Image: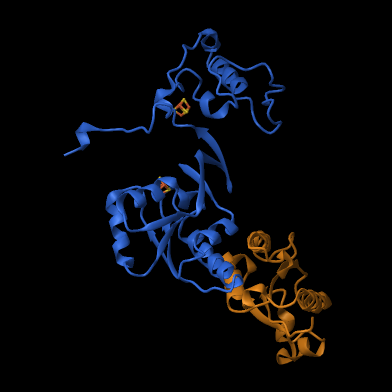
Chain colours: A orange, B blue
């Protein structure tokens, strides 16, 4: 099924520094999918379960979080907390009969790094594969 | 405190299938402390119900509120502030709260969002364990402060069953044999002899086997 997904990415500003490079143009040049709306947060550990759910309520087909490596979070345990909350949302989606893969957590190195773009592409492909959100009825 | 956990979402969404508007009502008592039914969990639940209904092609209007406790008449009266805003209440309190609303509000349909599980404490962050079963005839003064009713898989009153190995209960390697712990603790106070005292046959009527229980304190009634 081909459709234009809407994906919300919450990323801490350490791992999403690329989004600022070249006045925001660098990501685009590197082929970061245009389906992804990037929301920068001071620390992913501040993200609440309700924030992730609200993104689905607001029409996202997929939601993902990018935070620091587990053993190298700028705020020590922020990205570990985020991963736990992503897991809770995933379990809740599955309880509602929705594919858990629609929500993901990635731990990536800080700064300018190609993996940030690669994971964006991976998420875009995954959501295209899954099709539109079952909540968009 | 009373420990509870959220019911599976499919079960909750099924309860409210025919509702157009609901009040998701948190309790700021025990269930807030055990992170099952406080204000934060009620917000999460509201979002999940909206998503669940959307998936079923339906829409639902949700008001989210909270009471100090749902197990006191005076606080239940505060539900008045949401009059007209719901077809049913989904309570995130323990079963006591749901019963209390049902007792006091003859026109209000109320659904439980939680499975109420036990009286427990938080041993580690995010982990709760059962400590007391509310038996109404406490024996902790005889058992080193550790409860054989709630914490022995067989609620034995006269020492271990014989199935424990290395201090662990025979039902599971992760469960401590509370009788081993009672023995060790009594010994540490030089009171091992207490283990030899035969406990009399218990009268379980105080434990709920004699029907719903009630406590009346004349000094507090007016
Ligand atoms: S309603 Fe239940 S959860 Fe809330 S304070 Fe009372 S006993 Fe505790
Ligand atoms: S003996 Fe009864 S009242 Fe005492 S802790 Fe055990 S269950 Fe609770």
Instruction: Evaluate whether residue A41 shows in this view.
Output: no
| Residue drawn at point x = 55 percent, y = 23 percent | B155
| Residue drawn at point x = 44 percent, y = 31 percent | B134
Among all residues in the image, which is located at the extreme front? B18
- Left or right, B30 with reference to A104: left
Among all residues in the image, which is located at the extreme left? B222
| Residue drawn at point x = 56 percent, y = 56 percent | B11
- Left or right, B85 with reference to A42: left
Q: Position of residue A19 (x, y in %)?
A: 72, 84
Q: Position of residue A4 (x, y in %)?
A: 73, 85
In the figure, residue B56 lies in which quadrant?
bottom right
Picture layout, residue B34 above or below residue B131:
below
Q: Position of residue B112 (x, y in %)?
A: 47, 53
Picture layout, residue B107 above or below residue B196:
below
Picture layout, residue A65 above or below residue A59:
above
Q: Position of residue A82 (x, y in %)?
A: 65, 63
Q: Depth check: give the residue in front, B215 or B165.
A: B215
In the figure, residue A114 lies in which quadrant?
bottom right
Q: Quadrant of the C terminus of chain B?
A: top left
Q: Depth check: give the residue in front, B17 or B148.
A: B17
- Left or right, B21 with reference to A114: left
Instruction: Evaluate whether residue A109 shows in this view.
Output: yes
In the figure, residue B208 lies in which quadrant?
top left
Q: Depth check: give the residue in front, A116 or B95.
A: B95
Picture layout, residue B183 above or below residue A121:
above
Q: Quadrant of the N terminus of chain B?
A: top left
Q: Total of numbered circles in the picture?
A: 0
């Amino acid at each position: 099924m081909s459709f234009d997904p809407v994906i919300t990415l919450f990323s801490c500003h350490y791992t999403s520094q690329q989004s600022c490079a070249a006045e925001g143009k660098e990501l685009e040049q590197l082929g970061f999918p245009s389906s992804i709306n990037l929301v920068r947060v001071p620390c992913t550990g501040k993200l609440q379960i309700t924030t992730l759910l609200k993104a689905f309520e607001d029409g996202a087909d997929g939601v993902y979080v990018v935070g620091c490596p587990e053993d190298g979070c700028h705020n020590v345990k922020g990205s570990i907390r985020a991963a736990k909350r992503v897991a809770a949302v995933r379990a809740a989606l599955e309880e509602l009969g929705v594919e858990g893969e629609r929500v993901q957590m990635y731990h990536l190195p800080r700064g300018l790094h190609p993996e940030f773009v690669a994971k964006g592409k991976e998420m875009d492909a995954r959501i295209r594969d899954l099709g539109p959100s079952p909540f968009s009825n | 405190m009373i420990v509870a956990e959220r019911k599976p979402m499919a079960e909750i969404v099924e309860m409210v299938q025919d509702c157009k508007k609901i009040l998701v009502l948190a309790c700021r008592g025990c269930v807030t402390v055990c992170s099952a039914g406080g204000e934060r969990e009620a917000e999460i639940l509201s979002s999940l119900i909206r998503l669940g209904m959307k998936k079923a092609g339906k829409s639902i209007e949700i008001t989210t509120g909270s009471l100090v406790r749902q197990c006191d008449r005076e606080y239940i009266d505060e539900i008045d502030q949401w009059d007209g805003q719901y077809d049913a209440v989904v309570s995130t309190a323990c079963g006591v709260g749901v019963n209390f609303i049902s007792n006091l509000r003859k026109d209000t349909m109320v659904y439980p969002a939680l499975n109420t599980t036990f009286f427990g404490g938080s041993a580690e962050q995010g982990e709760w364990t059962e400590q007391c079963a509310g038996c109404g005839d406490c024996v902790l003064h005889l058992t080193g402060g550790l409860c054989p009713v709630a914490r022995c898989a067989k609620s034995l009153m006269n020492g271990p069953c014989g199935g424990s190995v290395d201090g662990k209960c025979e039902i599971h390697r992760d469960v401590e044999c509370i009788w081993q712990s009672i023995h060790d603790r009594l010994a540490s106070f030089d009171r091992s002899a207490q283990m030899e005292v035969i406990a009399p046959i218990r009268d379980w009527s105080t434990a709920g086997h004699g029907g719903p229980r009630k406590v009346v304190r004349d000094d507090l009634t007016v």
